[in-house]
Amino acid sequence: MKNVLIIGSTGQIGSELTMKLRGLYPEGNVVAGYIPGAEPKGILLESGPSAVADVRDGASIAKIVSEYKIDTIYNLAALLSAVAEKKPLLAWDIQMNGLLNILEVARENGCAVFTPSSIGSFGPETPHTNTPQDTIQRPRSMYGVTKVATELLSDYYFHKYGVDTRSVRFPGLISNVTLPGGGTTDYAVEIYYAAVKGEEFKCPIASGTFMDMMYMPDALKAAVDIMNADPDKLIHRNSFNIASMSFDPEILYNKIREHIPDFKMKYEVDPVRQAIADSWPDRMDDSCAREEWGWKPSFDLDSMTVDMLAALRRKFGIVG
Ligand code: SER
């Protein structure tokens, strides 16, 4: 990995992954791909090349791949679960037709491709605790349908054409740089913003609903490490369970209150998000990722909470 295209570089993952890759590969081209209306700004714009990369326009991807001699594509374009339920056709277009365009460009140009999957690729019949690597995947959300199909299509391109596709099933990702847009796990980010700003948090997910979550530095490490893993050791490819912590809103709220004792939360459950959350694992078994490419997270709920609160206080100039 040296010359890399990040599609969706201004999104929640892309904005941080692009900067991390530029730090790791200062001699290479790390291109921030974006769609009009979501242009990179500030350090993301100034620290390296950027280009319009719309997954629904394969020619725009092929042009960048050829111009910058791209060897690895991070395909991060997606509508998250709650938004995808409102716009299922658009979600299908971006996630499936877009993926096909990228895989074709990769096939023609010898690129490796990372397209994330998710806890959303599981469904109500999936075992919810210690969810195995290989198990039932019958999601009922459009987001989940596209994620299962992404895993299958990516594996198809590997087996049929030798395209080096690899991926992880991300838990809900918690970060302090760019907000996620319209996911079921977003509450676990928004709650920190409310706590730091001294606002009461209205929680859209019911008490007792456990989901896998992960702090962004661990997610970025996974995205880099899987693409650098020794291919001979990979039994699986698309896509690996990765886990680091699992909690429900009440546990998260009480953890934040250890630092901000007067923080208030009340429940205003969103039925769409709740139904999705109920169908997802409580906690995935990530032993295959640990064995096949050495996955090991660094953050737990305690250390993430300390770091999130400090980072958000700095961001908003709040003295803690
Ligand atoms: N964070 C995503 C969502 O909530 C799941 O991968 O939609």
Image (spheres, rainbow, N blue to C red):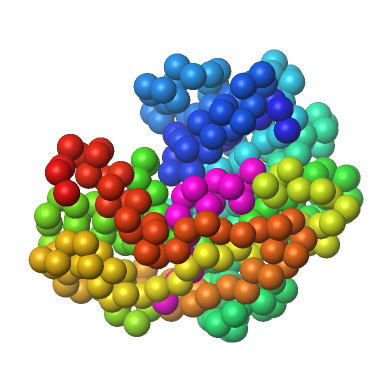
In this image, 100 relative to 9: left or right?
A: right
Residue depicted at x 61% and y 31%: 24
The stretch drawn in magenta includes residue 110: no
In this image, 240 relative to 249: left or right?
A: right
Residue 172 seen in the current view:
yes
Q: Position of residue 282 (x, y in %)?
A: 49, 77
Residue depicted at x 72% and y 74%: 134
Residue depicted at x 53% and y 19%: 48
The stretch drawn in magenta includes residue 216: yes
The residue lying toward the viewer, choosing from 204 and 218, is: 218
Q: Position of residue 207 (x, y in %)?
A: 29, 79
In this image, 24 relative to 103: left or right?
A: left
Residue 275 image-quadrant placement: bottom left
Residue depicted at x 74% and y 56%: 293
Total residue callouts: 0
Residue 233 image-quadrant placement: bottom right
Depicted 168 relative to depicted 14: above or below: below
Depicted 41 relative to depicted 251: above or below: above
Q: Position of residue 188 (x, y in %)?
A: 34, 61
Residue 138 seen in the current view:
no
In the picture, the quarter occupied by the N terminus is top right
Q: Chief secondary structure of the magenta span?
A: helix
Residue 64 image-quadrant placement: top right
Depicted 11 relative to depicted 154: above or below: above
Q: Position of residue 230 (x, y in %)?
A: 82, 48
Q: What is the magenta range?
A: 210-224
